[in-house]
Amino acid sequence: MQDLIRKLLLEMGEDPEREGLRRTPERVAEALRFLTQGYEQDVEKTLNEAVFREDYNEMVIVRDIDFFSMCEHHLLPFYGRCHVAYVPDGKLIGLSKVPRIVEIFARRLQMQERLTQQIADCLERALEPSGVAVVTKAYHLCMSMRGVEKQNAHAVASAMHGSFLQDYRTREEFMGLIQP
């Protein structure tokens, strides 16, 4: 990867041997490995022993989960907050696992819509709940630094399953509870 980054610097008209850039290929490679570590993380292993049988059937919400990801189209960051809810049907998950699931999927080259759906699908498979809802709100540097150059525009994506999709009251309760 470092050789590719050196070549990229040359293509940009830079001198990869100048003082400020000598270690840049190494630093960029390390940063990219960190930012895409989700490919090497196993969601199933993360959920291992974190799903509990419990007779509870009211909405569970973990909101304001900060995330950072990389746009697969431009390799530029997008970042924001994720709100996750589910209505259990006999299974609960350790609350700290919800942000870990968000992190695993965010640390891949992504589209915000896919990220949102992957989080919802993962919880659907693991918990078999009555419903799952995920909303992501993100700022995309590919929109603010280039292209349309709109610094304050953000995107919102949602994925609704089960009771959140079928019952507008459940969806409205969730949407009301995630408002600032």
Image (tube, helix red, strand yellow):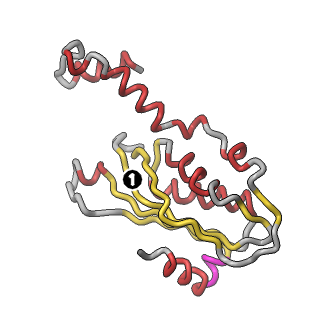
Check disc 1 and give the amino acid type. Answer: Tyr
Instruction: Give the residue number, with chain letter if any, for mark 1.
Output: 79
Q: Report x, y in % for residue 98.
A: 61, 57
Q: Along the horizontal axis of the image, is 162 left or right of 14?
A: right
Q: As drawn, which residue projects farthest toward the bottom?
A: 169
Judged by its main secondary structure, the magenta piece is: helix
Splitting the image into 4 quarters, where does residue 91 fall? bottom right
| Mark 1 nearby-residue class (10 Å; few <14, some 14–19, many ≥20) | many
Q: Is residue 156 magenta?
A: no
Query: Which residue appears at 37% of the width and 20% of the height?
Result: 26
Query: Which residue appears at 25% of the width and 62% of the height?
Result: 152
Splitting the image into 4 quarters, where does residue 39 fall? top right
Q: Is residue 58 above or below residue 141?
A: below
Q: Report x, y in % for residue 130.
A: 72, 73
Tag 1 secondary structure: strand
What number of labels is visible?
A: 1
Return the residue nearer the eye: 52 or 68.
Answer: 52
The magenta stretch is 163-167
Return the residue nearer the eye: 136 or 21.
Answer: 21
Q: Is residue 93 above or below residue 39?
A: below
> Where is the C terminus found, in terms of image quarters?
bottom left
Q: Along the horizontal axis of the image, is 78 left or right of 11?
A: right
Q: Along the horizontal axis of the image, is 98 left or right of 25?
A: right
Q: Report x, y in % for residue 178.
A: 49, 74
Q: Report x, y in % for residue 34.
A: 47, 34
Return the residue nearer the eye: 95 or 115.
Answer: 95
Splitting the image into 4 quarters, where does residue 21 fall? top left
Query: Which residue appears at 27% of the width and 53% of the height?
Result: 143
Return the residue nearer the eye: 126 or 63.
Answer: 63
